[in-house]
Image: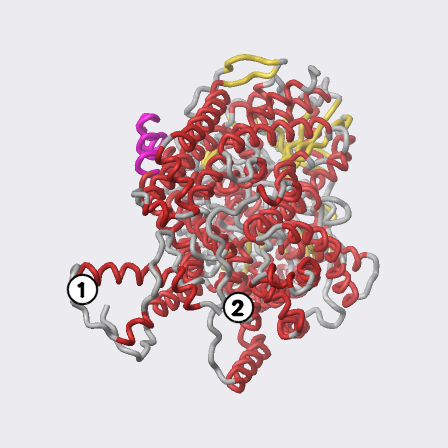
């Protein structure tokens, strides 16, 4: 027992950090319906600001903390509340896109303000040893973090249960109109919720940075990801359970760390405990207990462009001609175009999964990694190039089958988180294993006789066009109709006797196969494949880029990788690059907001309010028969979700 | 808003917002993936500014950073991924730190060398038989590609300045075989695509005859493939990956990567003669970390230590007390840290909190000047294997010349091991051309001529900067199985073995 006790202590210390993060996530989620992936980035911004005031400007830490928590928390909370209003009315996929955009924008903003380098800091909390347990010293700082977590968990639980505002916060997401009718302005309740959430995030960020003794925007931003498992234990609902869940995950992690010490093949298992808890938790927790907060919003299909077939065909022909001529134009930057072409299949597959079938995948680069590893191992075994690429796709099938299991019982946010958890498990536990990259580089090559950039470009172009045509064919087939129907209303589809589950499994396997082929082609570009090219963050970015790259697969599949891989090469100023990242983040937010017409509705609502103010209570406006078409008929609710306009715009 | 009747306006608010959003996003470039985009062209020696490709002007100040004098070193992580969020190495820009420690004082306003020599190199092997230049011949363009920003840039970025210093010094002497040197340095951000584009640009557009001082700790294989395709030599660089000794087009200036990894463990073991056991902590986020893990058992064996524990860690961990406890329980007296500098500091702190103070070993680029000030790393003693002699030394001809160059041209620039890496790459190039001096002075210098000169270098030590490297036509470089020892102790960096290479 004695030899395990230290790990119990370590686990509680680590778990209190997870618990604090998880509480912040759950708090903002249950009061807004938006699972804020940028929660860590908000905390990181607060941490940078705090240490700049305290260490850089020499301000006493209590004053610096007060300024950051009050000013940053207040202003940040109000801004985020406005964002949440807009995002509440969009589908889950676009909510995720919006919060990723926010993460990117904040991260770039921090880099612009403070630079890219990691700043080493001295902690502002006492580092003295408070007491010793089984030879393990517990510092005052660790006790403070634990105390803050416990205090916040208890305090917030009581607040939500006993206070009027807390009760209102619980009600504002589900039915703001009812809340309004009861005399409590929903907007004020939401703002209070976001201010509290942002203050919480700021406190967490400052504490974590102090514990890390470093200001690293990347680490602080991603620390919150480890709290997803704790949030799962809390079913994304209960704040006290989120903290308890964090402690539990932390303790389990450290105990596993002790247990696998002697087992080389299990190294890294402790690191993925939070994500295993996330993935397994989402599978075993009763479905009825996993309630997605807020009104479910189905992705609204955008009105199709009324272009004649001949016009579209001409457009595609011109596009193809440009692609054929590209090597003559690209010059020395042709390698970047080759990377983009290699990824067309991945984005086409993601389009099929997300846009056509309404699923969410936050691990598509994990599929690409599996495909790359399969391709590399096949080449090493002497398999011909084309067959090796196909094998790269085929080895993704069992992985896709595993990932489709949560898709059978989950949807929306929880499906997205399950895939994210699986992707991180792959990255942190499997990548360095012999069956994948084996802690080194897999040697790869291009097909014989086609090694030059130009020659290989045409090979990649052919495969890219084939992948897009395949997805287009699927979309136009009966399977495509089934997938769209499943996206629209799985219940209706199942009442017609069609198996929704089989459709889900099928689309995941097709998508996984294409992503695996793409991974193999990517791996062939630079004579080697390593794990460095397939981080889980890229999966988040892939979804975001796809969302803004166009509506049709033929456009989005080519534009998305172009934006991701080619355009950066044409920008030669580091500061400009960071500003452009800010722009990208903001752009993603705008696109998310525009996805359901929500932003238009919010603006219209504001215009209507202006009109009413101008015309007065008597309403002296002439009624213009055509004006009705510009204005939603039903009143808008407080979350910006235009139910009336949705009815008007319904298919 | 006035109503326009039934006729729909095209430019409604929604369309405007959509157009703006798409335009902004399109322009936004999505380098959210984290690839850096800074593309810089440095003059080898120009009248300040250093961002334009200009002709060589002897005697001008070396463009470079005006950092405070700190005990810098080739900082760097063993290779956390370069895309969006990863760990980053600590750099010298610590908030609130004074940046003190051992290091070279760099007087500002250094004067130009006026020894009148021309066409000579700093190495004994290369300097023989060089006649004075009667006139300047056509400039030789050399290219450089490296990660100049981000966490990798923080580790190795000073290679750029080191090469620029060399170019400055050699141009002050009349150039290499009477050819002034022009350096074109491009940032690749550790992105394979960008590196490929850089090589295409440098060779096809800029006419570079060789790639010098490449900083590619993560994408060494991509550089190898690129230079093989272009048939130009890559001369000198970070030498962190084994690719440097796996291609006839790669010419490292000194020890192979593996040798330096072994050297770290050996030195850490030597510091504690009673040590019998060793362990390793390696990060899971980066390929380089896990590569080092695979080589660690052999390194422990060479150090005469038993490999007792290999623990995977994450660079996002707030503390490493569990891992330290496991190492302590296993009795590891030497711990190899295959992680970034900031994480290394947390490890040292966590272990210290348990009363556990092993000797630490890591690779040279993992510890920056700021990390070297960490009291826990200092107290425990940290050892780094390096491919070139410690930048602190001055008792060999090559290092004497290096210190002179710094004094004359570096100004207040931060000097670290990366600086020496860049500088020594230029020396190797110079040594190669000295072997084909007559041909170099008679006509155009081509990549083939450069390689012809390189192939004549046998056991080249660059005046004591390296441990010896041999090249032959059509064969991979053979580096002497020797490393140099760098250490961190109270006060900062030091050279435990002086300038002497330690051979396995």
Q: Which residue is mark 2?
A: A559
Q: Residues within 10 Å of mark 2 (few under 14, many from 20)?
A: many
Please name the predominant secondary structure of the magenta segment in the image: helix
Please say if A440 is above or below B178. Answer: above
- Which chain is home to disc 2? A
* Label 1: which secondary element: loop
State the extent of the magenta-drawn residues as a range: A52-73
Q: Is residue A499 magenta?
A: no
Using the image as rendered, state which of residue A176 and residue A531 is in the foreground: A176
Earlier residue among tags 2 and 1: 2
Rendering coords of residue A329 (x, y %): 53, 76
Spatial CA span between label 2 and label 1: 49 Å
Q: In the rendering, which numbered label is found on residue A134? A: none
Residue A158 lies in quadrant: top left
Rendering coords of residue B20 (x, y %): 37, 66
Q: Does residue A503 appear in the picture of this structure?
A: yes
Rendering coords of residue B301 (x, y %): 78, 30
The reply to whether label 2 and label 1 mark residues of one chain is yes
Q: Quadrant of the N terminus of chain A?
A: top right
2 vs 1, front mark: 1
Q: Answer with left or right where residue B503 lies relative to residue A353.
A: right
Q: Which residue is mark 1?
A: A619
């Amino acid at each position: 027992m004695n030899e395990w006790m230290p790990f119990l202590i370590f686990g509680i210390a680590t778990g209190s950090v997870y618990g604090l993060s998880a509480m912040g996530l759950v708090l903002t989620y249950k009061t807004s319906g938006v699972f804020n992936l940028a929660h860590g980035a908000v905390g990181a911004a607060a941490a940078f600001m705090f240490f700049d005031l305290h260490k850089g400007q020499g301000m006493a830490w209590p004053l610096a903390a007060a300024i950051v928590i009050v000013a940053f928390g207040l202003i940040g909370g109000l801004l985020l509340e406005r964002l949440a209003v807009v995002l509440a009315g969009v589908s889950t996929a676009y909510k995720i896109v919006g919060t990723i955009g926010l993460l990117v924008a904040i991260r770039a903003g921090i880099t612009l303000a403070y630079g890219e380098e990691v700043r080493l800091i001295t902690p502002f909390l006492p580092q003295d040893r408070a007491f010793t347990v089984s030879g393990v010293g517990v510092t005052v700082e660790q006790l403070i973090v634990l105390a803050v977590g416990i205090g916040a968990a208890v305090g917030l639980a009581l607040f939500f249960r006993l206070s009027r505002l807390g009760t209102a916060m619980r009600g504002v997401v589900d039915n703001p109109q009812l809340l309004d009718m009861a005399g409590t302005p929903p907007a004020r309740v939401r703002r209070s919720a976001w201010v509290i959430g942002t203050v919480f995030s700021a406190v967490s960020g400052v504490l974590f940075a102090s514990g890390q003794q470093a200001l690293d925007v990347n680490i602080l931003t991603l620390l919150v990801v480890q709290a997803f498992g704790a949030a799962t234990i809390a079913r994304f609902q209960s704040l006290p359970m989120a903290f308890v869940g964090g402690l539990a995950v932390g303790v389990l992690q450290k105990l596993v760390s002790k247990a696998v010490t002697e087992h080389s093949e299990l190294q890294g298992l402790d690191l993925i405990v939070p994500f295993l808890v996330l993935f397994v938790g989402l599978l075993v927790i009763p479905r009825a207990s996993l309630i997605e907060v807020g009104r479910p919003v189905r992705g609204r299909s955008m009105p199709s462009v009324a272009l004649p077939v001949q016009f579209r065909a001409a457009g595609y022909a011109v596009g193809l001609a440009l692609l054929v001529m590209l090597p003559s134009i690209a010059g020395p930057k042709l390698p970047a175009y080759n990377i983009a072409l290699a990824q067309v299949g991945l984005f086409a597959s993601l389009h099929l999964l997300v846009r056509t079938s309404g699923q969410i995948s936050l691990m598509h680069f994990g599929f690409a990694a599996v495909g790359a590893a399969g391709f590399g191992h096949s080449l090493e075994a002497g398999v011909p190039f084309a067959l090796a690429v196909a094998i790269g796709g085929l080895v993704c099938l069992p992985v896709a089958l595993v990932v489709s299991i949560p898709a059978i019982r989950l949807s929306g946010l929880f499906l997205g988180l399950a895939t994210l958890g699986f992707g991180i498990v792959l990255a942190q536990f499997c990548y360095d294993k012999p069956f994948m990259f084996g802690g080194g580089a897999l040697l790869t090559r291009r097909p014989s006789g086609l090694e030059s950039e130009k020659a290989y470009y045409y090979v990649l172009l052919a495969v890219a066009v084939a992948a897009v045509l395949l997805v287009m064919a699927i979309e136009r087939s009966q399977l495509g109709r089934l997938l769209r129907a499943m996206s629209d209303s799985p219940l209706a589809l199942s009442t017609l006797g069609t198996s929704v589950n089989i459709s889900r499994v099928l689309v995941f396997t097709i998508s996984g196969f294409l992503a695996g082929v793409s991974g193999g082609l990517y791996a062939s570009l630079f004579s080697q494949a390593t794990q460095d090219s397939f981080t889980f963050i890229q999966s988040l970015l892939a979804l975001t880029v796809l969302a803004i790259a166009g509506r049709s697969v033929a456009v989005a599949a080519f534009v998305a990788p172009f934006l991701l891989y080619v355009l950066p090469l044409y920008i030669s100023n580091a500061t400009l690059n960071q500003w452009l990242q800010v722009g990208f983040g903001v752009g993603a937010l705008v696109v998310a907001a525009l996805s359901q017409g929500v932003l238009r509705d919010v603006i219209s609502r504001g215009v209507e309010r202006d009109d009413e103010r101008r015309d007065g209570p008597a309403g002296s406006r002439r009624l213009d028969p055509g004006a009705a078409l510009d204005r939603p008929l039903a009143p808008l609710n407080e979350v910006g979700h235009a139910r009336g306009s949705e009815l008007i715009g319904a298919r | 808003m006035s109503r326009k009747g039934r006729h729909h306006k095209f430019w409604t608010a929604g369309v405007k917002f959509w157009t703006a959003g798409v335009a902004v996003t399109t322009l936004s470039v999505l380098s959210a993936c984290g690839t850096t985009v800074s593309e810089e062209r440095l003059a080898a020696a120009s009248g300040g500014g250093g961002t334009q490709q200009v002709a060589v002007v002897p005697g001008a100040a070396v463009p470079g950073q005006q950092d405070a004098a700190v005990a810098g070193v080739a900082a760097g992580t063993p290779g956390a991924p370069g895309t969006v969020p990863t760990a980053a190495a600590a750099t010298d820009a610590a908030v609130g730190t004074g940046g003190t420690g051992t290091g070279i004082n760099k007087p500002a306003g250094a004067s130009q060398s006026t020894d009148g020599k021309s066409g000579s190199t700093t190495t004994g092997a290369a300097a023989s038989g060089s006649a004075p230049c009667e006139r300047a011949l056509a400039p030789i363009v050399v290219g450089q590609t490296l990660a100049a920003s981000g966490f990798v840039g923080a580790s190795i970025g000073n290679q750029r300045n080191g090469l620029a210093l060399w170019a400055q010094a050699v141009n002050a002497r009349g150039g290499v075989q009477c050819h002034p040197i022009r350096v074109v340095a491009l940032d690749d951000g550790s992105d394979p695509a960008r590196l490929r584009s850089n090589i295409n640009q440098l060779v096809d557009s800029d006419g570079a005859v060789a790639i010098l001082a490449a900083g590619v700790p993560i994408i060494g294989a991509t550089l190898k493939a690129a230079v093989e395709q272009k048939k130009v030599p890559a001369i000198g660089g970070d030498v962190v990956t084994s690719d440097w000794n796996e291609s006839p087009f790669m010419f490292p200036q000194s020890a192979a990567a593996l040798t330096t990894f072994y050297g770290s463990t050996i030195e850490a073991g030597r510091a504690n003669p009673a040590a019998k056991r060793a362990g390793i902590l390696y990060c899971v986020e980066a390929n380089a970390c896990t590569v080092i893990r695979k080589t660690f058992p052999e390194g422990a064996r060479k150090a005469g230590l038993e490999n007792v524990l290999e623990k995977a860690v994450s660079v996002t961990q707030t503390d490493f007390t569990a891992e330290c406890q496991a190492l302590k329980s296993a009795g590891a007296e030497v711990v190899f840290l295959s992680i970034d500098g900031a994480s290394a500091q947390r490890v040292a702190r966590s272990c210290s909190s348990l009363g556990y103070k092993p000797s630490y070993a890591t690779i040279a680029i993992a510890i920056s000047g700021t990390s070297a000030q960490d009291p826990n790393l200092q107290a425990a003693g940290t050892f780094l294997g390096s491919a070139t002699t410690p930048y602190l030394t001055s008792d060999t001809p090559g290092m004497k010349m290096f210190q002179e160059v710094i004094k004359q041209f570096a100004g207040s620039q931060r000097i670290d091991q990366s600086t020496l890496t860049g500088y020594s790459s230029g020396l190797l190039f110079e040594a190669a051309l000295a072997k084909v001096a007559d041909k170099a002075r008679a006509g155009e210098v081509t990549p083939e001529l450069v390689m012809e000169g390189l192939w004549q270098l046998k056991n080249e030590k660059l005046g004591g900067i390296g441990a010896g490297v041999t090249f032959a036509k059509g064969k991979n470089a053979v580096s002497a199985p020797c490393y140099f020892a760098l250490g961190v102790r109270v006060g900062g960096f030091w050279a435990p073995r002086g300038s002497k290479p330690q051979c396995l």
